[in-house]
């Protein structure tokens, strides 16, 4: 009998959710950097085998929203609690287990299997791990707890095996050759944003959004024109850099990543524009795809 289901990955920012999903899917679907709030959208990655289809969903880290963009991100995370067949709650050896108790209480109410994955166990010892397992068992008594290291790829195969056992019998939800529910343009904007996260400091990465204006594909190449939006003129100057040097670096690194992602020659043009207070504008957030309602 064929199995299929939705496996949703939730947890606080920077615990390794995106790294884990990329490992489980076997493709580079989600941005994974060391800065918080890296994932802003709910991203589906699909793993297909002859016997099963697992639809993984990577969500933004759970945080208390300070502006409307973060409110939209929190809605994406909460929606993952509603439609899961299996829930992966990712934590690590660094954060305190009681962080975001309100969200943990919501997880406790779920009537689907919950796997609590303690990531980054390579940063601890056996005594610390044992204590952490006991703490999490007290907080989530109905969940299964599995220690892992996504970076070292330790126990990830065990997680996948357990998911397979828990999946319901079902025909596939998507075509068997499909890797994600997102269009190509979405991954262009995510890769551009990833390079900005890597190359700029302080608040700059968190006031940036990108949008593709032109995506023209031929047999051997793709022509891309994209806009980078910031909230103030001063931020625009930082993104561009002296004589355009910073923006050129972003474009060069994004082009290399996109060529690996699409397997084609990439020609990319980036423009920087000011879109004042876009993070607090419902209309502008809808324009950037943050249009999900509770």
Image (cartoon, grey):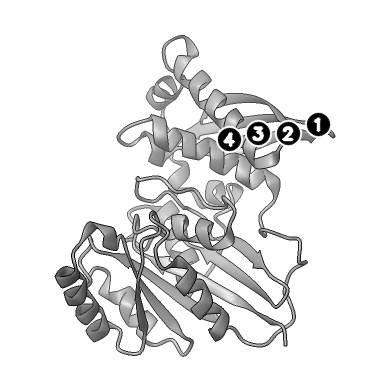
Q: What element carries label 2?
A: loop
- For marks 1 and 3, give the CA distance: 11 Å
Residue closest to the far top: 243
The residue under label 4 is 257
- For marks 2 and 4, give the CA distance: 11 Å
Q: How many neighbours does mark 3 have within 10 angstroms: few (below 14), some (14-19), or many (20 or more)?
A: some
The residue under label 3 is 259
Image x and y of residue 283, in percent: 56, 49
Question: Which residue occupies 21% across, 71% down?
Answer: 129
Question: Which residue occupies 59% across, 75% down?
Answer: 6
* Mark number, residue 220: 1
Above or below, 94 relative to 138: above
Q: Can residue 70 be seen in this view?
A: yes
Q: Answer yes or no: do the residues labelled 2 and 1 have beta carbons within 8 Å?
A: yes
The residue under label 2 is 264
Q: In this view, does 183 lie to the left or right of 96?
A: right
Residue closest to the far right: 219
- For marks 1 and 4, give the CA distance: 16 Å
Q: Answer yes or no: do the residues labelled 2 and 3 have beta carbons within 8 Å?
A: yes
User: Residue 174: which quarter of the image?
Assistant: bottom right
């Amino acid at each position: 009998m064929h199995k299929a289901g939705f496996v949703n990955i939730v947890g606080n920012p920077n615990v390794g959710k995106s790294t884990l999903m990329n490992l489980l899917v076997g493709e580079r679907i989600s941005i994974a950097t060391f800065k918080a709030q890296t994932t802003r959208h709910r991203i589906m990655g699909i793993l297909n085998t002859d016997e099963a289809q697992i639809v993984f969903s990577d969500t933004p880290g759970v945080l208390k929203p300070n502006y409307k963009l973060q409110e939209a991100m929190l809605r994406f995370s909460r929606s993952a609690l509603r439609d899961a067949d299996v829930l992966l709650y990712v934590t690590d050896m660094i954060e305190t287990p009681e962080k975001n108790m309100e969200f943990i209480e919501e997880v406790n109410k779920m009537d689907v299997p919950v796997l609590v994955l303690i990531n980054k166990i390579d940063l601890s010892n056996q005594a610390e791990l044992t204590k952490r397992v006991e703490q999490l068992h007290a907080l989530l008594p109905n969940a299964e707890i599995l220690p892992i290291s996504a970076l070292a790829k330790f126990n990830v195969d065990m997680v996948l095996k357990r998911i397979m056992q828990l999946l319901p019998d079902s025909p596939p939800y998507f075509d068997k050759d499909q890797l994600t529910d997102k269009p190509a343009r979405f991954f262009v904007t995510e890769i551009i944003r990833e390079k900005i996260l890597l190359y700029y400091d302080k608040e700059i990465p968190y006031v940036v959004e990108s949008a593709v204006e032109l995506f023209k594909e031929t047999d051997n190449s793709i022509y891309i024109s994209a806009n980078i939006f910031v909230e103030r003129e001063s931020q625009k100057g930082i993104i561009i850099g002296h004589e355009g040097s910073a923006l050129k670096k972003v474009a060069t690194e994004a082009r290399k990543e996109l060529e690996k992602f699409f397997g084609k020659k990439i020609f990319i043009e980036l423009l920087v524009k000011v879109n004042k207070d876009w993070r607090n504008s419902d209309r502008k957030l809808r324009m950037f795809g943050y249009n999900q309602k509770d």
